[in-house]
Image (cartoon, rainbow, N blue to C red):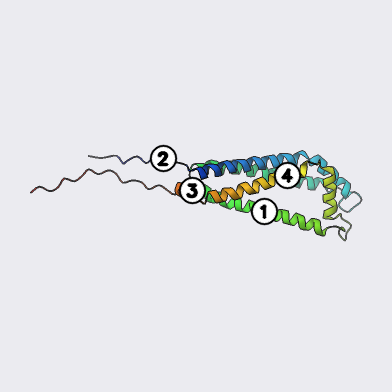
Amino acid sequence: MAYAAAPVEPKRRPAVVTVACWLLCLVAAAQVLSAVVTLSQLGASRQAYREVFLATPMKGAEDMFVAISAASAVGFGLLLGVGYVVLAVLDGRGRNPARIITWIVAGLSVCISVAGLALNSAALSTGGTGSANGAPSGQEIQQALDNAWPGWYQPVLTTIGVVSLVGLVATVVLLALPAANRFFRKPEQPAAWQPPVPPPTA
């Protein structure tokens, strides 16, 4: 006579994983918002580039710089935001490969963001006199952009960036906690039920 295996109880998602998933969604929303804010000021950026490049060897290059800004906003904002939402859904279902990908993507995003901030600061601190071929310096370009952008633009982007960094770091930590490890561990399949063996008769 065949006996069915005992049913496997569904895994209960711990609070740390739920919070991590919501943080990923928050970071995704922040990425999309950052892209929208950046795209909203492309016209002002083009005008700033045009003015600072005027009467320099870089005259006419403003469209290329604006195209790069737009591509970066779409590529690293919208697409990355969609990716974070997908990872949040899969993490919430206990998919361990998704957790590993989340660690990798979040770690790379944090490193890239920190490196970008450091490079921007270094470029502004060393670019005050312009280049030898008459092109405007990094500081002159940044000053022209700051003058063209509204006063809320940079603070909003900075706030979004800080929120994203904090959210990603918190997500990585939460998904590494013991409660999360138990949730992502593959459940053991119970053995099929076997009837008791009667004792031997004399």
Label 4 vs label 1: CA separation?
16 Å
- Bin the neighbour count of mark 1 within 10 Å (Cα to Cα): few under 14, some 14-19, many 20 and up: few
**In the picture provided, is 143 more to the left or to the right than 98?**
right
Looking at marks 2 and 4 on the same chain, the residue that comes earlier in the sequence is marked by 2
Looking at marks 4 and 3 on the same chain, the residue that comes earlier in the sequence is marked by 4
Label 1 vs label 3: CA separation?
26 Å
Residue ID at (76%, 45%): 154
Relative image position of residue 16 (x, y in whole percent): 52, 45
- Which mark, residue 112? 1
The residue identified by callout 2 is: 10
Residue 140 seen from this side: yes
Look at discs 4 and 1 and give the one toward the viewer: 4
Identify residue type, mark 2.
Answer: Pro
- Which mark, residue 157? 4
Q: Are marks 1 and 3 in contact (CB under 8 Å)?
A: no
Relative image position of residue 118 (x, y in whole percent): 73, 56
**In the picture provided, is 52 more to the left or to the right than 164?**
right
Taking the view exactly as shown, the residue that stands out farthest to the bottom is 132
Helix, strand, or loop for circle 3?
Answer: helix
| Occupied quadrant, residue 6 | top left
Label 2 vs label 4: CA separation?
42 Å
Residue ID at (68%, 54%): 114
Relative image position of residue 160 (x, y in whole percent): 69, 44
Look at discs 3 and 2 and give the one toward the viewer: 3
Looking at marks 1 and 3 on the same chain, the residue that comes earlier in the sequence is marked by 1
- Bin the neighbour count of mark 4 within 10 Å (Cα to Cα): few under 14, some 14-19, many 20 and up: some
Label 4 vs label 3: CA separation?
32 Å
- Residue 134's place in the image compared with 34, above or below, is below
The one nearer the camera, 54 or 190, is 190
Looking at marks 2 and 1 on the same chain, the residue that comes earlier in the sequence is marked by 2
Relative image position of residue 100 (x, y in whole percent): 53, 51
